[in-house]
Image: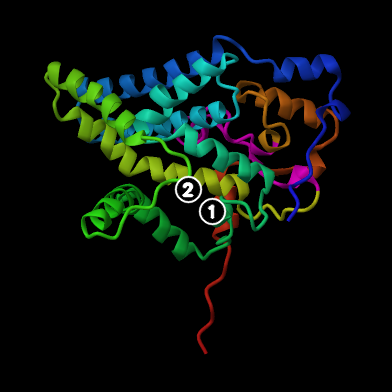
Amino acid sequence: MPSVTRVDPKSIFTPEEWTKLSVQSWWKGPALVAYAWAVMIGAGALFIWYPNPATYVLAVMLIGTRQLGLAILEHEAAHGTLHPNAKLNDWMAEWLCGGPIGGSLKRYRPYHLTHHKYTEQPEDPDLVLSRPFPVTKASLVRKFVRDLTGQTFFKQRIRQGVGPFIAQLQGQGRKQPRVRDNPGLRFWITNGVMIVTTSALGYWWAWPALWIVPMATWFPFVVRLRAMGEHAMVNTQADPFTHARTTLANPLERLFIAPFWVHYHCEHHCFMYVPCYNLEKTHKLLLQKGFRERMRITKGYIEVLRRCGSKTEPVAA
């Protein structure tokens, strides 16, 4: 199918408005990366200083959400908007954002730009994330249980990672990725730094308890919830303002589910080279200019859950 229709920002914003929205800051991207790591270190330190079930659950939630935050900042870098210097943009994504969580900017960038080119069309590689919805409430609960108990992590990280190695041992060969990269090397280098540092401080258990557990539980849960909010049941039409949903997240939702303005997804799809820290300004300007009726806007993630879990159970004959 042909690529989706694009929005010409010059048809909506004045030159002065568009300059303010699209300009890239030399310091905001690095500051967001530093902030993500500061929150994770602070959350881990809180549990170490005051170890109890409540502070541990809080740490897992905060760290898991900031791991999503690192993925979001890697996504920014895929659009070239994490930093105006292209080399620094890619280096931060590879070593400070994607590397510690196993991401690969080289593989993600072409994949993600294809998603933007064919949003919600058969060629969209992310269609599998939105196509199943709506589902029943029971199905939604089962998905979240799999996420929060580590089953999704095992399926996506462990089994897929070990599978090709086993196949190679069995003589079945190994399928080479379309883009050659070695994210595993960056993962173990960056995680090795964490392991050595925490062990040297006397907390050898911190890496599995405060990095792997959040990555295996809360991280896949918020990744799924974020994906549901972005594209599930958006009723896509030819109008590009219907290709993604903006979820008006409250402060708690931004803290535990949707960091770094990721919930302004309609704005991102319409103007994908606007840095994330300018998406809220873009949203407000669009509302002022009368675009609300054309946009897909949902108030909070509770409403996203209600819509995505609205399929009724079949009635027994």
Q: Is residue 22 magenta?
A: no
Give me the residue at 33% from left, 47% from top.
Answer: 157
Could you tell me which secondary element the residue under label 1 belongs to?
helix
**For the point 77% across and 53% down, which residue is it?**
237
Instruction: Determine whether, in the image, residue 92 is placed left or right of residue 13.
Output: left
Given the image, on which type of amino acid does mark 1 rest? Answer: Leu
Front position among marks 2 and 1: 1
The span shown in magenta is 239-266
Q: Position of residue 162 (x, y in %)?
A: 26, 50
- Find residue 128 and report its image quarter: bottom right
Queried whether the magenta region covers residue 257, the answer comes back as yes
Label 1: few (<14), some (14–19) or many (≥20) C-alpha neighbours in 10 Å: some
- Tell me the number on the disc at residue 188: none
What crowding class fits label 2: few (fewer than 14 Cα within 10 Å), some (14-19), or many (20 or more)? some
Name the element at disc 2. helix
Q: Is residue 300 above or below residue 206?
A: below
As shown in the figure, which amino acid type bears the numbered disc 2?
Arg
C-alpha distance separating marks 2 and 1: 8 Å
Residue of label 1: 129
Q: Position of residue 226 (x, y in %)?
A: 52, 43
Tell me which numbered mark, 2 or 1, is placed earlier along the sequence: 1
Which residue is at the front of the view, 198 or 166? 166
Q: Which residue is mark 2?
A: 224
